[in-house]
Amino acid sequence: MHVPDGFFNAAVSISAGAVAATGVAFCLRGARRELDDRTAPMAGLVAAFIFAVQMLNFPVAAGTSGHLLGGTLAAILVGPHTAVLCVAVVLLVQGFFFADGGLTALGVNITLMGIVAVVAGWAVFRLITKASRGRGAVVAASFVAALISVPVSAVTFALLFWVGGTAPIEVSTVAAAMGGVHVLIGIGEGLITAVTVSTVLAVRPDLVYGARGLAAPLVLRGADGEAVVTGEPRAQGAPRRIGWFLPAGVLVAALLAGIVSFYASSSPDGLERVAEDKGFSGQAADHALADQPLADYGEAGDIPVGLAGLVGVGVTLAVGGGLFFAVRRRSRGEASARDEVSA
């Protein structure tokens, strides 16, 4: 659901840019509470993974495809504030290196795919996990939250286009079309999110931010039959460094972007299909960087899509990792300063 240049007038583009900038600034402060020695490298990995999986368009209906948004997945793995930053990093890399998503629409894309998707997905996830504990509840909540976040973002696009789009639309018709096709895409989003969260829970549950404190406590029964609650579950033990999980995750992202991307669906995604069907696809303007070699994931420069994907994974990992470690260092510096003052 990458919005191209030309879909929105200047007023909405500037306003969405201001909302996105404010949201990113707010999340930079909030991420200081979420990032630690595990989540800082994990956040860089999550951004690279989202970039890779977004290259894998999957068919959802005749002539229509979809791809992961990733906001809910990132929120569950590394926290909601850090998730917005992850998605923003992915969109920046896509927009400036691969001409995917308009530069004037960058604020719109961060608002829709980052802020709206993360807020909606995280709210649903927390609502469900407050009512039920345990690993199964976390996985189920991941699926439902991710599914819902996609049509919410899609309908928000329709409302924004009604307010400041460059073509007249019947808002109810476009909202219904966007919501309908993106429910189907949301099912794919939910499955990818649930499988990913379940896999990480199976091997490193301490790396799932949304599962902290949610697993049921370990209960032992003595010889007299009385139950003894031991407190935090075994999976929530002493913090460990990310260790082997980082290179393993990078390898998975590289395989997805470098090999599996060759088999991605070439059908237009949900937004492109609705724009064609409702008659406003012609409003899209050419991307300012459409002639650079990596544009359209290498198509502009006759670069194999797999090689372009590997470059994207590397750039996203470097940009995201650098940002998250910088935020982590600043958080440590502020904590040290507070300790010195209190001493």
Image: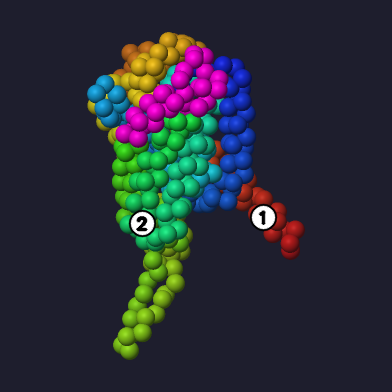
Question: Going 56% across and 16% down the picture, which residue do you hit?
Answer: 9
Whether residue 298 is visible: no
Q: Position of residue 13 (x, y in %)?
A: 57, 21
Residue assigned mark 2? 137
236 shown above or below 188: below
Q: Secondary structure at mark 1?
A: helix
Label the magenta part by its dominant secondary structure.
helix
Residue bounds of the magenta highlight: 157-185
Q: Dot 1: few (<14), some (14–19), or many (≥20) neighbours within 10 Å?
A: few
Any magenta on residue 14? Answer: no
Q: Nearer the viewer, residue 147 or 37?
A: 147
Residue assigned mark 1? 336
Amino acid carrying mark 1 in the image = Ser
Q: Secondary structure at mark 2?
A: helix
Q: CA distance from mark 2 to mark 1?
A: 37 Å
Q: Single out the residue that lies furthest toward the bottom.
A: 224
Question: Going 49% across and 15% down the picture, which residue do you hit?
Answer: 168
Amino acid carrying mark 2 in the image = Ala
